[in-house]
Amino acid sequence: MNYKETGADKAFTFINYTVLTMLFIAVAYPLIYVISASFSSSSAIIQGKVFLWPVNFNLDGYKAVFNYASIMTGFANSSFYMIVGTSVNIALTVMIAYPLSRQNLIGKRVISLMLIFTMIFNAGLIPNYLLIDKLDLIDKRAVMIIPKALNVWNVMITITYFRRTIPKELLEASQIDGCDDFKFIRMVVLPLSKPILAVITLFYAVEHWNAFFDAFLYIKSASLRPLQIVLREILVQNQISMDMISSIDPENLAVKENLATLLKYSLIIVSSLPLMLLYPFIQKYFVKGVMVGSVKG
């Protein structure tokens, strides 16, 4: 049956496409500009010549970033925190979300209220620091993993997903076939939960990769610093202060100022590139996992 669009339908479609196009440009243009600026000359950036494509293409910003020996240490540390931390997050989230998604769990309401309580109330910076100190986690790799071992919001959307996707009849059928709970989770629940696992993996991975404040507070050793701290140090080292203006040769000052301009854009790309490469592999699960997991029921 062919449906003939009315004038109102065509007007709605036109407005819809116009608004979506404007939103796409508003979201995509800043990213395109940053990428183009990172490959352009500093003079072109300062003069405002960069609009859509790189001007006077060069890799000076990236060469300057990767000349720092600490950059690879930062990459290795951030990768370690992201991989190990996300693995711990996923394991704990599934272990607590699956029992809470079952109706016959004794004490489910109390456990849920305890989890929600931690979402609403936070002890604050100083009590948290004292707790981390008491646990002897200061300047340890574990301090980047243990305090973030569980995110209650991700647990809640995982519970909702399990409740809507894994019916009790499936568990009962598996139990009749002799399947215990651990085997049921491994053989049935996890294969059917790829969308939500992909989504919370991305959420946790982004959180660990962008971890800055915790590392700033608790990590002292240079060998343990994540990439975000290393990039901040590189940027700070190339900032020009008022004292430097009077003490440095004007020519060297101009070179340093140009390098600082390039570094701003190059550092954004360097810190974002791993997650930008990761996203396409889980994009097909993203919409389904977020939408199904976020619906209350």
Image (cartoon, rainbow, N blue to C red):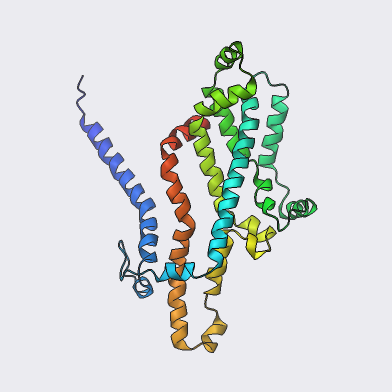
Residue 222, position as x, y percentages in the image: 64, 65
Q: Is 64 on the left-hand or right-hand side of 134?
A: left
Q: Is 128 drawn above or below residue 189 in the view shown?
A: below
Q: Is 236 on the left-hand or right-hand side of 117?
A: left
Q: Quadrant of the C terminus?
A: top right
Q: Is 3 drawn above or below residue 114 in the view shown?
A: above
What residue sits 30% from the left and 68% below the top?
55
Q: Of residues 177 and 227, which is closer to you in this image?
A: 177
Q: Is 22 on the left-hand or right-hand side of 149?
A: left
What residue sits 59% from the left and 54% below the top?
211
> Can you name the residue that lies furthest to the right here?
134
Residue 41, position as x, y percentages in the image: 36, 72
Q: Quadrant of the N terminus?
A: top left
Q: Is residue 297 visible?
A: no
Q: Is residue 233 visible?
A: yes
What residue sits 36% from the left and 52% below the top?
28
Residue 44, position as x, y percentages in the image: 34, 72
What residue sits 62% from the left and 27% below the top?
98
Q: Is 200 on the left-hand or right-hand side of 143?
A: left
Q: How many marks?
A: 0
Residue 129, position as x, y percentages in the image: 74, 55
